[in-house]
Each structure stands twice: as structure tokens, then as C-alpha cells.
Image (cartoon, grey):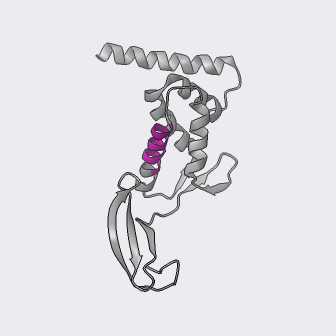
């Protein structure tokens, strides 16, 4: 590892610990040449995921874009940022485990909706209204009916 101060490649590791919920390793290092201390992170290299948009364009998957959309859907609810980040981590992990590197934006949206259904009905409906492009009140009513029917099915199973 090259020292940011003197560019020497000789350093020693002072401390190592897990970071990013165990998905990376944080290391404190000291340069053996100039004694400058610095931090490095070691992560598993991932292959980028390409999102196929509705308008047939392609773009690289963006965690921050997904997190922004979730934050908007969860405004003024009791869902914390840490819960949203955990949700994005889960979805990104599921996408990385797939063999296909291309994924439709609609698939990502449905994955989000599955998770939101369990967390908050309000956030679910807000996200669904954008993702499924609601055109009017009937779209909201249908979504609310589907939530109620799912609840009814779960109640009869219990």
C-alpha cells in the first residue's frame, strides 16, 4: 500500500476491523519511511449491475439513487435512515448474487415494494404510486385493496 504522504510502499498494519456491516475491512497503517498514519479499506470487487430503464436506456445501478427514492417514500414516517440503508444493502446483495448483470428497473422496484410492504404501508403506497405510475384514485384504491386482502389472507392462516 502506497503512503499518501511520501509514496513509499512500505507500511505496517496497526489495526484491522470489520466495516460496512462486515462487507469490508478497515485497516490503520503506519508508513515505515515517514511514520505517517493512514486508513485503507479492503472490499470484495463487485461486477457493476446495469439497470434497464423503461425507456430502453441503460445505466449503472446506483445505491444513492435507490436510497433517495426510498427516503422520499418514507418521509414523515417512523422509518430511520439506518433501516433504509439496510434495505438497500439487502437489495444490492440480492442483485449481486444473480448471474445476470442486467436487471430491469421494474424488477428492482418490485423488490423494494416487497420489503416496504413489511415495513410501512404508507411508504409502500407512496413508492408504488411512483413506481407503478398511478394515474388516478382507482390505482390507489386497487393497491390499498391488495394490502387489505394480503392482511386478510395472513389473518386466516394464523
Say which quadrant the N terminus sits in. bottom left
Residue 34 to residue 150: above or below: below
Q: Can you name the residue that lies furthest to the left here?
A: 158
Q: Residue at x 47, y 81 (%)?
A: 2
Q: Is 89 part of what is drawn in magenta? A: yes
Q: Which residue is drawn at 57% across and 25% down?
A: 125
The picture places residue 102, in percent across and down from the top left corner, at 54, 56
Find residue 75 and report its image quarter. top right
Q: For this rendering, which residue is in front, 33 or 99?
A: 33
Q: For this rendering, which residue is in front, 150 or 85?
A: 85
Q: Is 131 part of what is drawn in magenta? A: no
The majority secondary structure of the magenta stretch comes to helix
Q: For this rendering, which residue is in front, 5 or 42?
A: 5
Say which quadrant the C terminus sits in. top left
Q: For this rendering, which residue is in front, 15 or 120?
A: 15
Residue 27 to residue 73: above or below: below
The picture places residue 34, in percent across and down from the top left corner, at 45, 83
The picture places residue 50, in percent across and down from the top left corner, at 57, 57
Write down the region rendered in magenta. Answer: 81-92
Q: Residue at x 35, y 55 (%)?
A: 22
Q: Residue at x 40, y 14 (%)?
A: 152
Q: Can you name the residue that lies furthest to the front here?
A: 35
Amino acid at each position: 500500500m502506497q503512503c499518501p504522504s511520501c509514496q513509499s510502499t512500505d507500511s505496517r498494519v496497526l489495526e484491522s476491523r470489520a466495516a460496512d456491516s462486515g462487507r469490508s475491512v478497515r485497516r490503520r497503517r503506519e508508513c515505515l519511511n515517514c511514520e505517517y498514519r493512514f486508513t485503507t479499506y479492503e472490499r470484495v470487487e463487485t461486477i457493476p449491475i446495469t439497470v434497464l430503464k423503461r425507456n430502453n436506456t441503460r445505466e449503472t445501478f446506483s445505491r444513492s439513487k435507490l436510497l433517495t427514492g426510498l427516503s422520499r417514500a418514507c418521509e414523515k414516517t417512523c422509518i430511520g435512515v439506518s433501516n433504509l440503508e439496510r434495505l438497500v444493502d439487502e437489495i444490492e446483495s440480492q442483485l449481486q448474487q444473480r448471474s445476470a448483470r442486467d436487471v430491469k428497473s421494474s424488477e428492482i422496484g418490485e423488490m423494494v415494494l416487497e420489503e416496504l410492504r413489511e415495513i410501512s404501508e404508507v411508504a409502500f403506497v407512496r413508492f408504488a404510486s411512483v413506481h407503478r405510475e398511478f394515474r388516478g384514485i382507482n390505482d390507489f384504491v386497487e393497491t390499498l385493496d391488495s394490502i387489505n386482502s394480503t392482511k386478510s389472507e395472513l389473518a386466516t392462516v394464523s
